[in-house]
Amino acid sequence: MNRLKEIWAELRKQPASMSGLAKIRYSESSDCDLYLGIRLPEDSSCLLLGLPIRVINKINSERKLRGLRLEKVDDPQHSTRGFLNLILLDNRFSDIFDSLILDIIRHIINLENEGIIAREFLNRIDKWQALFEKAASEGLSPEAQRGLFGELYFLKKWLYIVEDKAKCLQAWVGPELAVRDFEYGGLALEVKTTKGNNHQKVQISSERQLDVTTLDFLFLFHLSLDVQQNAGETLPGLIESIKALLIHDFSLYSIFQEKLLQAGYYLSHQHLYEFKSYKIRQESFYEVKEDFPRIQENEVRGGVGDIKYSIILSNYSDYLVDEQVVFKTLNWHGRNARES
């Protein structure tokens, strides 16, 4: 991430009167001929991939990309080579563009075969197009903001105490619309946030969410919040504190950025979330087992669907479990999952 910032800063030093394309190679040691650039006088950010003309000629650059354009550019210094140039057309999407660049770098920087590099470069662009489409929305709903805050609050707690931070990010599948927010092997954890007077009542969104049939352990993390203005921790503040834990690991940082975008959190919407703060009223862990109140998939009669229900957690204190036990189980289970 620091290398990215360094290159952008250097490129922005170009005189405003300049016209054309200025570029800087991302890595001198890599076989991957990748550059960051800016097109002047438009001041458009670019990502350029140098390839042989024979490879470029086989590529269809006509893609319908929201906020982006992909074009073929000649290399004036080498007649047998050219560039695929990905141009950011809308600066509102600059945070997504940087995250896309990080993701592309992570997937191609160590590759050597230029045909494979080109294919993976295009695959990543196609994958990210859906995120550019979502960025045109008006931000997360209040409920989605609280839900994301709860998932990130738990993620930060886990990142603080574990050495294998990659496992934490791999397990965070809430942004992918998985059944539960965290899943790793035979272990899962669901986060529920509540606010207001009904702070002990949680909503369960399907018959599978608390189904332990295929799991070794299932925990429910309940976070009771007070939502206030400028008094407590904001969603952007929590995100920045997690980024600080990952900033020195390029791969983990880029994975986290990608998951935020999958969750619908965009830097262009950050101003919508800066004045809403959350104070923690109570946080509790429950182990879902035995007679814990829930509906399981094998209990549902044929023809019944779209099941949603609520649980009053204050009635089930027998299933409370200490936080240290939860994290010990998570970390022990993670080691065994890798060894098996």
Image: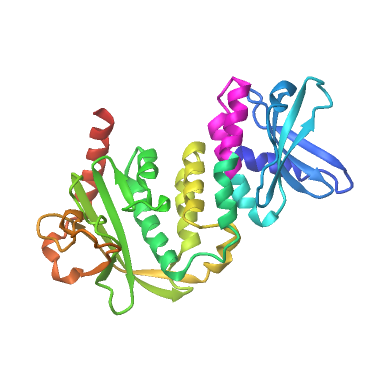
Quadrant of the image occupied by residue 101: top right
> Would you place residue 61 above or below residue 151 in this image?
above
Identity of the residue furthest to the right in this view: 17
Whether residue 261 is visible here, answered yes or no, is yes
Q: Is residue 95 magenta?
A: no
Identify the residue at horizontal 37%, vertical 56% (top origin): 151
Quadrant of the image occupied by residue 24: top right
Whole-percent x and y of residue 170?
38, 42
Whole-percent x and y of residue 199?
28, 74
Identity of the residue furthest to the bottom in this view: 197
The structure's colour scheme is rainbow
> Would you place residue 114 above or below residue 184 in this image?
above
Observer-nearest of 229 and 303: 303
Observer-nearest of 244 and 177: 177
Identify the residue at horizontal 69%, vertical 54% (top origin): 91
Whole-percent x and y of residue 127?
54, 43
Whole-percent x and y of residue 42?
81, 50
Observer-nearest of 82 and 238: 82
Observer-nearest of 326 and 104: 104
Task: Specify whether 133 is left or right of 152.
Answer: right
Split into 4 quadrants, where in the image is the N terminus? top right
Split into 4 quadrants, where in the image is the C terminus? top left
Identity of the residue furthest to the front in this view: 303
What secondary structure is the magenta-colored segment mainly? helix
Give the magenta range: 100-124
Whether residue 30 is visible here, answered yes or no, is no
Identify the residue at horizontal 34%, vertical 38% (top origin): 163
Task: Specify whether 276 is left or right of 152.
Answer: right
> Would you place residue 9 above or below residue 53 in this image?
below
Identify the residue at horizontal 56%, vertical 23% (top origin): 111
Q: Does the magenta stretch include residue 112?
A: yes
Quadrant of the image occupied by residue 308: bottom left
